[in-house]
Image (tube, rainbow, N blue to C red):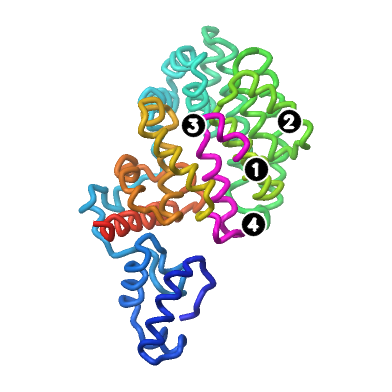
Amino acid sequence: MALLLGKKTKVLMAMRKEAKRRGLSWKAYLESTNAEELIALCQQIDPSIDPAELIEGLPSDPPVDVAQWGLPPRHALRTDLISPVPVITTAVTAARAGDWRPAAHLLNRSYGDWALRAAAVHALAETVADDRTWLEAWRASGTGDDKHIAAVDAQGLLWLAWKLRGDNNNENTTAQQYEAFVQLLPQAEAAAWKAAELAQEDPTPWTTLVTLAMGLNFDNAKFGAVWRELLARDPLHRSGHEFAGQYWSNFGTDRMLGFALQAAPASPSLAFLIVQAAAEGEDENENVWQQAEVHRALDAMLHWLGTPQGGGGVDASADRRWAAYGLVNAGRGAEALPLFQQLGIDASGTPWHYWGDAAIANFDRYRRRACAATSARQ
């Protein structure tokens, strides 16, 4: 087994100490010690550790019974849940069946509640990217409010563009996929400007423009102008901040973290930005999860989720996902277990979907590490 350069110095030192005690070289120790013993030593020193990060060939998943901790079995995990918000689930389900009326009711109801509206438009737009029949039926009925239809239409074109491009990196994206993506993005931008004109006070179309900024390669000046318009309508807009962070990631993880550190102090609802930036930079900086500002952000997230507004809000599940991911990586896995218990079977969304088809496997791996850390603490 080949040693991988890792960040768990404490565990590696313990292994070297054990090798010396046995009178063995490091190589001889690794070759003569079975995987179960190495995993046990890893868990003894740091129960949140992923053994595969230290020694190639060791399994990632701690051998724990997740049911003992009130977690559902792996086969029950889902990545395709529509939304943790029932009214959004109802509207999306009806739209997929061709009935636009629940969506119309939801968008009328959510106007002014910008967090709910952002989540609703996001979910409904994904259905439009698959099949826009219900949206066109709503438009043809003559009973719809144009500003609602326009907001969903703009976001739907954006999601369709990304769907046509696919989830692969640039090297694995075909010329045909990229061409379809490039041709559709300007249509999405034009639709977003139209939506912004129809609803002067609504930050939602501006969030679409912020998201488009990556694909259309907005320069900093153009992005800044869009960003100021969004903040003027909702200074704490969570979805807008999330995609703004992604825009700044194109200029390096330091720029993304700088944006997060500047924005997060405004509200605990934005603390996730620092954790998101840490996740983006973890491959470049192996110590990022030990940085004080990351731990302060995790503390702020836990406090926020413990309040009625944070724990019962539209974005609570998204915050639980980021907090659970960050806590395990930061060596605080036991604090993540209640979050995994609340998430239940929901393995959807960021950061899990970054692994594509392996989303469920990685969600399961992280919750096992949280269980192992809890067991070690007791």
Amino acid on which the number 2 mark rests in the picture: Gly
Q: CA distance from mark 4 to mark 3?
A: 36 Å
N-terminal label among 1 and 4: 4
The residue shown at (41%, 32%) is: 83
Q: Which residue is mark 2?
A: 224
Q: Secondary structure at mark 3?
A: helix
Report if residue 85 lies within the magenta region. Answer: no
| Residue stretch rendered in magenta on the structure | 261-288
Image-based side of 200 in relation to 318, left or right:
right
Q: CA distance from mark 2 to mark 1?
A: 15 Å
Q: Position of residue 210 (x, y in %)?
A: 66, 31
Q: Secondary structure at mark 4?
A: helix
CB under 8 Å between discs 2 and 1: no
329 is higher (above) or lower (below) than 80: below
Amino acid on which the number 4 mark rests in the picture: Asn
The dominant secondary structure in magenta is helix
